[in-house]
Image: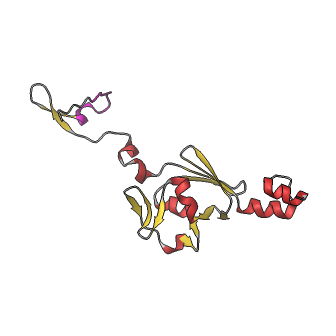
Amino acid sequence: MDRREFLWAMGGTMMLPEMAGAQAASRATVLYDGRASVLNRATADGDALWIQMADLKGINGFELKPQGACREDICIPIPRPMMNGTRFNLSAFAQRVGQRVVADPAMRVWSFGEIPVVRGAFLESRQAPDFSVPDRKGRLVRLSQFRGKKVLVVTWASW
């Protein structure tokens, strides 16, 4: 094995300049949910990150299906401009689902925040939904009556 083949096989940083530039231009790091995913076939268009469709599931758990991008029982319809051949615009998807994104295209790093449709709407306000239950004397007590106070809710079921 000659030096060029060795460096290419090992992914060394001492590659020939033309090889290093080509590889760096297609590599990107995506940060999401406490994980860093290094993608070798990603392209950037300004702040927009285009990834391979096959990489989507490993990044955020969504899988592309005919009905859209799906994760468990959630499916988000995907318009055609967000796809191009085998590539998928991850930045446009984040904008579509209301996900926060911080990008540094020069360093080829994109950081994605929580996906609101995945975490549930109740976490948006960090408040439990209002409900009412009877107290020991049979009077209805609403959770909203305790707004601004710390409350411990204990539940029990006989089944």
Q: Observer-nearest residue: 33 or 96?
A: 33
Considering every residue shown, the one lying at the far front of the view is 1
**Color encoding of the figure:** secondary structure
State yes or no: residue 150 in magenta.
yes
Q: Horizontal placement of 76 versus 14: left or right?
A: left
Who's the residue at 49% across and 54% down the image?
Answer: 61
Magenta region, residue range: 143-153
Q: Position of residue 94 (x, y in %)?
A: 51, 58
Q: Position of residue 58 (x, y in %)?
A: 55, 54
In the rendered view, would you say 151 is above or below 99?
above
Who's the residue at 23% across and 33% down the image?
Answer: 145
Who's the residue at 38% across and 48% down the image?
Answer: 120
In the rendered view, would you say 12 is above or below 90?
above
Considering every residue shown, the one lying at the far right of the view is 2
Looking at the rendering, which quadrant does residue 131 occupy?
top left
> Predominant secondary structure in magenta?
loop
Q: Position of residue 108 (x, y in %)?
A: 69, 56
